[in-house]
Image (cartoon, rainbow, N blue to C red):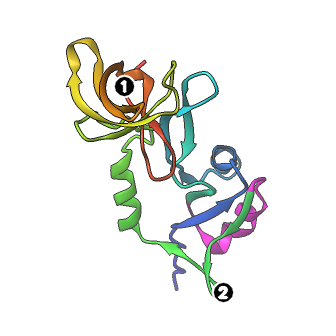
Amino acid sequence: METAVPKPEWYCLRTGLKQEAKVAALLRKEIGVEVLSFYVRFRRLRKTAPIWVKEALFPGYVFARFDYVGQHRHVQAISGVAAILKFGEAPAVVPDAVIAELRLLSPANEVLEVNPALGVGVEVTVARGALRGLQSLITRILPARQRVAILLEILGTHREVEIESAHLLSRHPRRAVAIGSD
């Protein structure tokens, strides 16, 4: 009688803080399992100006495809792996359809760049210059000069001011994300 060869399935692994890339590399190198770890690139305001940063799309998690019965101990022993997610006592299998949907985000496992489109009515924060820190709305797009007009309240009156789009951060639910390009 023929025994069934275990089919590798997708599991979600919880990693240590900012350990996603390290865990993915170790899983590939030491065990040879397929790993998915997605990253986003965006601009974040620092003391002097916005800078480009790269962060995990799912902070603290990576997806790995392996035979649970034969490899879970080895996977769990990889430096940076905190746990294999479970529902109750059983490991939580991530359906292939979910993995396929995630791969649509980044077909070649590349870094996704978040660069919000400028538009009239978009709420922004000034990131550079004398107006740094002020929040405003874009009133006009001036694409030929890579500038926009924003509406500021200054001394109790509203004034439209032109500013370089690269000096603005759009408002994002989690954080401010820079608009414009380098």
User: Horizontal placement of 82 versus 21: left or right?
Assistant: right
Q: Secondary structure at mark 1?
A: loop
In the figure, residue 167 lies in which quadrant? Answer: top left
Which residue is depicted at the point 55% across and 26% down?
51
How far is disc 2 from disc 1 in space, using C-alphas?
A: 48 Å
- x, y percentage for residue 66? 58, 63
Determine which of the numbered discs, if any, sits on residue 89 in the image. 2
Q: Which residues are magenta?
A: 64-80
Residue density around tag 2, few if under 14, some if 14–19, many if 20 or more, within 10 Å: few
Say which of 14 and 179 sits in front. Answer: 179
> Is 114 above or below relative to 48?
below
> Is 47 above or below relative to 85?
above
**Label 1, on which residue?**
180
Say which of 4 and 41 sits in front. Answer: 41
> Total marks drawn?
2
Residue farthest toward the top in the current orientation of the protein: 145
Looking at the rendered structure, the kind of residue marked 1 is Gly
Which residue is depicted at the point 54% across and 53% down?
34
Viewer can see residue 146: yes
- x, y percentage for residue 130? 51, 19
Q: Earlier in the sequence, mark 2 or mark 1?
A: 2
Q: Nearer the viewer, mark 2 or mark 1?
A: 1
**Residue 79 highlighted magenta (yes or no):** yes
Which residue is depicted at the point 55% across and 36% down?
54
Asked if disc 2 and disc 1 are in contact, CB closer than 8 Å, the reply is no
Say which of 20 and 95 sits in front. Answer: 20
Say which of 171 and 154 sits in front. Answer: 154
Viewer can see residue 111: no
Determine which of the numbered discs, if any, sits on residue 151 in the image. none
